[in-house]
Image (spheres, rainbow, N blue to C red):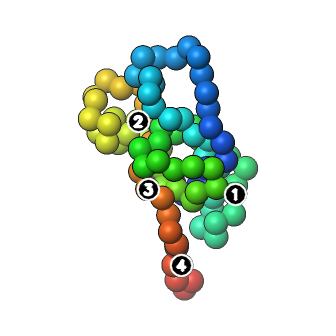
């Protein structure tokens, strides 16, 4: 799993039928301190996240397919949670 911040929406007029009715979001990956890393993923939204939300993303195809409940779904990344806060313990 990765953490990130939603930075935008993806709109497509032609896509695989699996994606019909699904919201795709651009998620900028963040490090353990909440700063963006310069990397991003495009993820299916399953929690009604929006731009600016800190989110938790499963970025692994088999795990994403298990969450969707379709073993043949063409998916890799899915947003599974909106992060309210992160409490770090520096050792």
Rendered residue at 66%/42% (across/down): 8
Q: Nearer the viewer, mark 3 or mark 1?
A: 3
Dot 3 corresponds to which residue?
A: 81
What is the C-alpha distance between the residues marked 2 and 3?
17 Å
Q: Could you tell whether 68 is left or right of 6 in the image?
A: left
Q: Mark 2 or mark 3, which has the lower sequence index?
A: 2
Rendered residue at 63%/62% (across/down): 31
What is the C-alpha distance between the residues marked 4 and 1?
17 Å
Q: Residue 61, which numbered label?
A: 2
Q: Residues within 10 Å of mark 3 (few under 14, many from 20)?
A: some
Q: Mark 3 or mark 1, which has the lower sequence index?
A: 1
Residue 70 position by quadrant: top left
User: Mark 2–mark 4 contact, CB under 8 Å?
Assistant: no
Per the image, label 3 sits on a secondary structure element best described as strand
Per the image, label 1 sits on a secondary structure element best described as strand
Q: Residues within 10 Å of mark 2 (few under 14, many from 20)?
A: some
Per the image, label 4 sits on a secondary structure element best described as loop
Residue 23: give x, y in percent of width and height.
Answer: 50, 35
Residue 38: give x, y in percent of width and height.
Answer: 73, 50
User: Mark 3–mark 4 contact, CB under 8 Å?
Assistant: no
Dot 4 corresponds to which residue?
A: 88
Whether residue 29 appears in this view of the structure is: no
Per the image, label 2 sits on a secondary structure element best described as helix
Q: Nearer the viewer, mark 2 or mark 3?
A: 3
Number of marks: 4
Q: Residue 36, which numbered label?
A: 1
What is the C-alpha distance between the residues marked 2 and 4?
28 Å
Rendered residue at 43%/56% (across/down): 81
Q: Could you tell whether 1 is left or right of 32 in the image?
A: left
Q: Mark 3 or mark 4, which has the lower sequence index?
A: 3
Q: Mark 2 or mark 1, which has the lower sequence index?
A: 1
């Amino acid at each position: 799993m990765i953490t990130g911040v939603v930075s935008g929406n993806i709109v497509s007029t032609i896509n695989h039928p699996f994606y019909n009715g699904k919201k795709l979001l651009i998620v900028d990956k963040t490090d353990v301190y909440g700063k963006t890393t310069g990397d991003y993923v495009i993820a299916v939204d399953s929690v009604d996240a929006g731009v600016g939300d800190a989110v938790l993303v499963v970025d692994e195809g088999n795990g994403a397919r298990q969450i969707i409940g379709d073993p043949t779904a063409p998916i890799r990344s899915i947003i599974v949670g909106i992060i309210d806060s992160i409490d770090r313990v520096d050792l």
